[in-house]
Image (cartoon, rainbow, N blue to C red):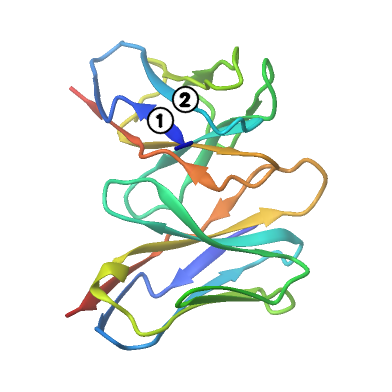
């Protein structure tokens, strides 16, 4: 059974710093890997989705990488801002026809200090 | 704008009572999902539906029921058999098999 781990559980950085969030998964047979943002009391917003055949995806100040062989993904945030403060979740989608079940990590709570 | 609407935002359940959480989408997505989120835990899948009139159990379906009579709607009923219903419930939808669009959630508590 797939397990997804995110370390650290919480991270606090000063504004302007570049940072990396980590996600590891136990089963490399994934269809894709997705990073989400969750603000307190809100739903999830999809940030980046990396297909299994891709190595990275970029959107603005965000860059996500995927290394299936090592079971790792990272989310890089450049020039962090207080508005980036939120919980970041990664989720792995299994390979195999018709499989709809994402496995989520517990998230990393990011605080960006002005 | 297209999106997913969950209602109500807050819901309280009495002992022995069934309650229904609403999820409506106007994205024309075929697949819809219900997740449960508990503090300090990842999201867990309750039920999902790939098409109208069809749905499958997820990892924690016991004590819950769903229906999918319309493409736009996927209501979740939390039955009295669910002994620990207090949680944040999230509905999602997708065109393919990877949910990317989520509602803003319903927080359910026990009175």
Secondary structure of the residue carrying tag 1 is strand
Discs 1, 2 touching: Cβ within 8 Å? yes
Q: Residue at x 48, y 74 (%)?
A: A60
User: Considering only vertical position in the picture, is A16 above or below B4?
Assistant: below
Q: Is residue A111 visible?
A: yes
Q: Which residue is denoted by mark 2 in the rendering?
A: B24
Query: Local crowd at mark 2 within 10 Å, few (<14), some, or many (≥20)?
Result: many
Distance from disc 1 to disc 2, alpha carbons, whole Å, reads: 5 Å
Please indicate whether residue B27 sits to the left or right of residue A41 in the image: right
Please indicate whether residue A53 sits to the left or right of residue B42 in the image: right
Q: In terms of depth relative to the viewer, which is nearer, B77 or A45?
A: A45
Q: In terms of depth relative to the viewer, which is nearer, A59 or A64?
A: A59
Q: Position of residue A14 (x, y in %)?
A: 23, 85
Task: Name the disc covering residue B5, or none.
Answer: 1
Secondary structure of the residue carrying tag 2 is strand
Q: Are marks 1 and 2 on the same chain?
A: yes
Please indicate whether residue A8 sits to the left or right of residue B56 in the image: left
Instruction: Identify the chain of the residue marked 2, using the numbered disc in the image.
Output: B
Task: Name the disc covering residue A50, or none.
Answer: none
Quarter of the picture holding the C terminus of chain B: top left
Q: Is residue A1 visible?
A: no
Q: Residue at x 36, y 37 (%)?
A: B105
Q: Position of residue A7 (x, y in %)?
A: 44, 74
Query: Local crowd at mark 1 within 10 Å, few (<14), some, or many (≥20)?
Result: some
Q: Position of residue A78 (x, y in %)?
A: 41, 83
> Upstream in the sequence, badge 1 or badge 2?
1
Q: In terms of depth relative to the viewer, which is nearer, B96 or A111?
A: B96
Q: Give residue A11's quadrant in the image.
A: bottom left
Instruction: Identify the chain of the residue marked 1, using the numbered disc in the image.
Output: B
Q: Residue at x 54, y 39 (%)?
A: B45
Q: Position of residue B32 (x, y in %)?
A: 58, 32
């Amino acid at each position: 059974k797939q397990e997804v781990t995110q370390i650290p559980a919480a991270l606090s950085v000063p504004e302007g710093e570049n940072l990396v969030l980590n996600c590891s998964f136990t089963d490399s047979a994934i269809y894709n890997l997705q990073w989400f943002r969750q603000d307190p009391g809100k739903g999830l917003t999809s940030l980046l989705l990396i297909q299994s055949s891709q190595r990275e995806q970029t959107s603005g100040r965000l860059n996500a990488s995927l290394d299936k062989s090592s079971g790792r993904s990272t989310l890089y945030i450049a020039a962090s801002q207080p508005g980036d403060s939120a919980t970041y979740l990664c989720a792995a989608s299994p390979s195999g026809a018709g499989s709809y079940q994402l496995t989520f990590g517990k998230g990393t709570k990011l605080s960006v200090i002005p | 704008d297209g999106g997913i609407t969950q209602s109500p935002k807050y819901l309280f359940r009495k002992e022995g009572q069934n309650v229904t959480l609403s999820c409506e989408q106007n994205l024309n997505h075929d697949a819809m999902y219900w997740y449960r989120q508990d503090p300090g835990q990842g999201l867990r899948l309750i039920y999902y539906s790939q098409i109208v009139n069809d749905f499958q159990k997820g990892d924690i379906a016991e004590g819950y029921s769903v229906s999918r009579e319309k493409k736009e709607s996927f209501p979740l009923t939390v039955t009295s058999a669910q002994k620990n219903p207090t949680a944040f419930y999230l509905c999602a939808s997708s065109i393919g098999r990877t949910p990317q669009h989520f509602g803003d959630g319903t927080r359910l508590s026990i009175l």
